[in-house]
């Protein structure tokens, strides 16, 4: 009798445990479904006008009716370079896009493109040529707003005539005694600029080095979610030679055998919110490193390279988009669009 009772109690206990496990499983799945639905709902709510959202961004590329342009081909084209990354982002080279077609697609979207440039200390001398050549080549015919961060007084600002749909705003910044600090603080200032001034009226942003000038078109072909430029100095090299930060103690660390390309700190961009996330993350990592008394090998360029390895760029610009004036063109470089000017570091850097 006692034995039967004991068996019954064990069976009841077993059923109870099974019921509890089943309840937990069902309620957990229910919670997952709920949170998924909530998430989808939030996404729709955030984009209360989905048609307007799609129309503005590159997700929805609508060309004008009856537009005539050269027939595209999938069997003829550039064979001397790779035009797509392993994660299927386009790599933009001359001959891979139709500028007229792209401009016709983006013009009705009425986009605004911001550009940031830092001209601190003696680097102010590069600003005039940067701005003058941007007028000739950078998003010509589109609404462009250039933000110049400088510590120089108004009298030192070059006077450059800008087209009607283009404007310039000067953002005062403190001077600095270390060039590393100037280039590194850019991420923080870009993050703040986006948060305080650009949201609501800017679609895309490009962050560019001032000691450079435009030689050719840089336009709508460069638009994308997250856009990186391949560094002209390393694009033919094995990745073991890339000057990534190699100390594991740094948040910019990229181990040997890892990484895709070596990207430039002197030019990057994309949709406003993508660049905001990049700037915020690189700034946080840079500051956390500083608290541990470590400065990455190439300051914010190292952090940017770590970021782009994990958050893959959705469009990659070939080294046409940041060459170096002192370097002869390699055969695959059919056009130089933007290029660093030759400079004497000893003359222009604070120390
Ligand atoms: C590389 C990067 C640069 C940055 C740096 C690492 C390219 C082409 N350049 O160039 O973007 O990542 O390595 O720190 O990828 N600046 C001033 N005043 C100064 C010093 C710098 O305004 O006294 C600004 C200016 O906008 C300049 C930028 O910081 O263009 C980068 O400085 P750089 O050009 O001297 O850095 P560089 O040539 O080592």
Image (cartoon, helix red, strand yellow):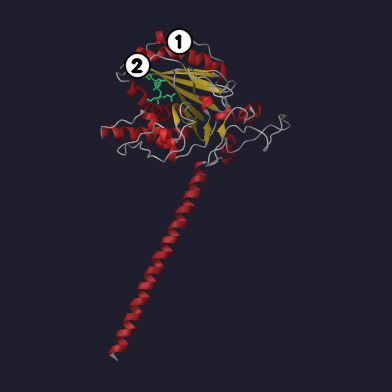
**Image spot of residue 65 (x, y percent):** 71, 33
Q: Residue at x 52, y 25 (%)?
A: 321
Quadrant containing the N terminus in the rendered view: bottom left
Q: Please give the label number shown on residue 349.
A: 2
72 w.r.t. 186: above or below: below
Q: Could you say whether the residue bearing mark 1 is in a helix, strand or loop? A: loop
Q: Residue at x 67, y 33 (%)?
A: 63
**Image spot of residue 334 (x, y percent):** 59, 24
Query: Counting other residues with Cα less than 10 Å from the Cα at mark 2, is it few (<14), some (14-19), or many (20 or more)?
Result: some
Residue 186 vs residue 54, the one in the foreground: 186
Query: Counting other residues with Cα less than 10 Å from the Cα at mark 1, is it few (<14), some (14-19), or many (20 or more)?
Result: some
210 w.r.t. 60: above or below: above
Residue behind label 2 places its C-beta within 8 angstroms of ligand 1: yes
Q: Residue at x 43, y 38 (%)?
A: 259
**Image spot of residue 66 (x, y percent):** 74, 31
Residue at image mark 1: 158
Q: Residue at x 49, y 13 (%)?
A: 129
The answer to which quarter of the image holds residue 293 is: top left
């Amino acid at each position: 009798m006692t034995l039967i009772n004991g068996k019954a109690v064990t069976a009841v206990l077993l059923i109870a445990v099974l019921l509890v496990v089943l309840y937990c499983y069902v309620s957990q799945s229910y919670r997952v479904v709920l949170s998924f639905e909530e998430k989808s709902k939030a996404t729709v709510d955030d984009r209360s006008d989905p048609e307007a959202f799609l129309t503005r961004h590159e997700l929805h590329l609508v060309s004008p009716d009856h537009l005539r342009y050269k027939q595209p081909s999938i069997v003829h084209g550039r064979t001397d370079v790779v035009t797509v990354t392993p994660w299927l982002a386009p790599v933009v080279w001359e001959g891979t896009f139709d500028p007229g077609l792209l401009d016709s697609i983006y013009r009705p979207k009425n986009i605004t493109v911001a550009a940031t440039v830092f001209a601190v200390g003696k680097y102010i001398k590069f600003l005039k040529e940067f701005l003058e050549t941007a007028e000739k080549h950078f998003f010509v015919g589109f609404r462009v707003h250039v933000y110049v961060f400088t510590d120089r007084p108004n009298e030192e600002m070059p006077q450059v005539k800008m087209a009607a749909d283009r404007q310039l705003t000067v953002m005062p910044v403190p001077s600095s005694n270390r060039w590393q600090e100037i280039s590194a603080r850019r991420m923080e200032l870009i993050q703040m600029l986006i948060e305080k001034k650009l949201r609501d009226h800017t679609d895309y942003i490009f962050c560019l080095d001032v000691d450079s000038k435009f030689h050719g078109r840089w336009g709508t072909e460069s638009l994308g979610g997250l856009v990186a430029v391949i560094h002209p100095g390393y694009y033919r090299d094995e990745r073991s030679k890339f000057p990534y930060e190699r100390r594991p103690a740094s948040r910019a660390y990229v181990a040997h055998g890892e990484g895709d390309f070596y990207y430039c700190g002197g030019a990057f961009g994309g949709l406003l919110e993508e660049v905001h996330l990049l700037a915020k993350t690189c700034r946080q990592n840079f500051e956390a490193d500083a608290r541990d008394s470590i400065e990455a090998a190439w300051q914010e360029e190292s952090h940017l390279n770590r970021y782009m390895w994990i958050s893959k760029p959705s469009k990659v610009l070939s080294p046409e988009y940041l060459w170096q004036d002192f370097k002869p063109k390699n055969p695959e470089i059919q056009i130089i669009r933007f290029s660093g000017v030759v400079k004497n570091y000893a003359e222009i850097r604070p120390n």
